[in-house]
Image: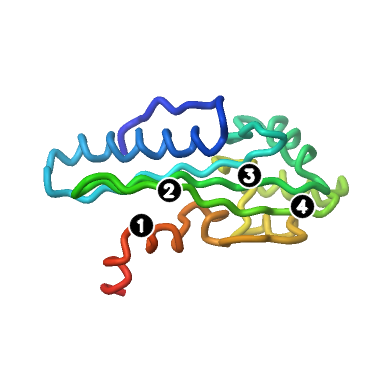
Amino acid sequence: MPEVDELRTGEPAEVVLENARRKARAGSEATRDAQAVVLGVDTDVAVDGRLLGKAGTEEEARERLELLSGRTHEVLSGMVLLGAGERSGVARSEVTFKRLDEQTLSMYLDSEEWRDRAGAYAIQGLGAILVEELRGDFSNVVGLPLALLLDMAPELGKSL
């Protein structure tokens, strides 16, 4: 996938949607096939009206996880499907973290699962131990909101 200059600030839903659009357009340009159908998705964690992004260091991961500890945050995925026109949407899920004690936090950080993850956790892996409650689409929190994809492209469901 070609590198894309992603937005990091702004209204969270607008940012993830624009980043998804940039990814889809870059993918479309890279295919050089006018008939190609290209999907761009950008998933991030929002808390207090700002996106957390991915942690670059263990210290940044610790800061993110401590911020999320005992709180509810929103996971947003912008999705853009290019082909015969453009279809787009944003999926939203709410995740509430348990209050994280030092032992749990250290164990999770030592696992290094936080690397390359929005909000510094992966709910589909060991990160599940951090979560108290999920409201919304699990696949959205993983990073590919299947319900939104099928809403945008119901024809995909016919081939499953």
Which of 36 and 117 lies nearest the eye of the viewer? 36
Q: Nearer the viewer, mark 4 or mark 3?
A: 4
Marks 4 and 2 sit apart, C-alpha to C-alpha, by: 26 Å
Query: Is residue 157 at all visible to an observer of this figure?
Result: yes
- Earlier residue among tags 1 and 2: 2
Q: Are the two marked residues, 1 and 4, in contact with CB atoms closer than 8 angstroms? A: no
Task: Determine the residue positioned at 70% across, 46% down.
Answer: 73
Local SS, label 2: strand
Q: Earlier in the sequence, mark 4 or mark 2?
A: 2
Q: In the rendered view, would you say 136 is above or below 29?
A: below
Q: Is residue 26 left or right of residue 116?
A: left
Binning the other alpha carbons within 10 Å of mark 1 as few (below 14), some (14 to 19) or many (20 upward) gives some
Residue at position x 42%, y 34% in the image: 19
Q: Position of residue 90 (x, y in %)?
A: 48, 47
Distance between the Cα atoms at labels 3 and 2? 26 Å
At x 40%, y 25%, the residue is 5
User: In front: 60, or 140?
Assistant: 140
Marks 1/2: CA–CA distance: 8 Å
Q: Which residue is mark 2?
A: 89
Q: Quadrant of the N terminus?
A: top left
State the image coordinates of residue 139 (x, y, percent, origin top left).
52, 60
Residue wearing tag 4:
97
Helix, strand or loop under label 3: loop
- Is 149 displayed left or right of 53 in the figure? left
Q: Earlier in the sequence, mark 3 or mark 2?
A: 2
- Could you say which disc has been placed on residue 114 in the image? 3
The residue sitting at 64% across, 42% down in the picture is 120
Residue type, mark 2 in image:
Gly
Element assignment for label 1: helix
Q: What residue is disc 1 on?
A: 152
Say which label, 4 or 3, has the lower sequence index.
4
